[in-house]
Amino acid sequence: MKTLILVDVQNDFMPGGPLEVPLGNTIVPVINKIQGYFDLVVATQDWHPKNHRSFASNHHNKKPFDRIILNGVQQTLWPDHCIQGSRGAELQKDIEMNRIAAIFRKGMDPEVDSYSGFYDNNHYSATGLAGYLKEKGATEIHFCGLAADICVYYSILDSIREGFSATLIEDASSSLFPDKFDDIKCELAKSGAHIIISNELRAS
């Protein structure tokens, strides 16, 4: 079953949001255009409590993008974002919702961040996404969303570890740090991921 996963296409990552991804809004029309090419569409959603330890505001004398060790793992500290129940945590309003079969929330444990849609950053807790996809018979998974160099990247790596074929749709994704994205793409290719643009879906 050909599957599309929309990663964290949420208001707080849009231009003007507290953790805006450059050009994050430009991927929305592409995402809406490609959904019809897939048998199954699911989404992930950052869903943080206010006291999440990845927020710089929850550490004395720390600022966004500082780094600390959190429960044994290097953690970048972020601006407060995607707080449970907030408008910023909602999926961007123009995303076509009718084909989205399920939404998997992540980052709910205040003590550990969760970039991947499959596991927290310590790989202690699963979201249930892998089991859901396997139950649905998904084998070929395409990824898009925000940010391509963080949450999309880690989701792809975990999907490959789970035995899925993984493809990044580059023009339906945007990076938080665009100058580093070429390195990220190289890492994805080395891990066995495919990288395409949306126009190639017609021939796949």
Image (tube, rainbow, N blue to C red):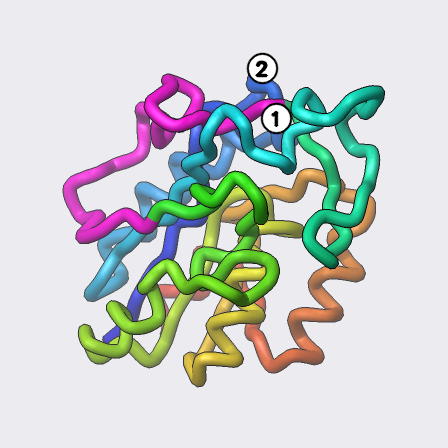
Where in the figure is residue 20, as x and y percent of width and height?
A: 61, 26
- Nearest to the observer: residue 171 or residue 63: 63
Q: Residue furthest bottom?
A: 163
* Quarter placement of the N terminus: bottom left
- Circle 1 is placed at which residue position? 20
Q: Picture quarter containing residue 140?
A: bottom left
Q: Are marks 1 and 2 in contact (CB under 8 Å)?
A: yes
Left of 174 or right of it: where is 135? left
Label 2 Cα neighbours within 10 Å, binned few <14 / some 14-19 / many ≥20 = few
The residue drawn where x is 68% and y is 31% is 78
- Nearest to the observer: residue 154 or residue 189: 154
Q: Is residue 200 positioned above or below 82 on the image?
A: below
Q: Is residue 88 magenta?
A: yes
Per the image, label 1 sits on a secondary structure element best described as loop
Where in the figure is residue 118, as x and y percent of width and height?
A: 44, 62
Q: Is residue 143 positioned above or below 31 on the image?
A: below
The residue drawn where x is 73% and y is 58% is 72
Q: Which residues are magenta?
A: 80-104
- Circle 2 is placed at which residue position? 16
Q: Mark 1 belongs to which amino acid?
A: Glu
* Quarter placement of the C terminus: bottom left
Per the image, label 2 sits on a secondary structure element best described as loop
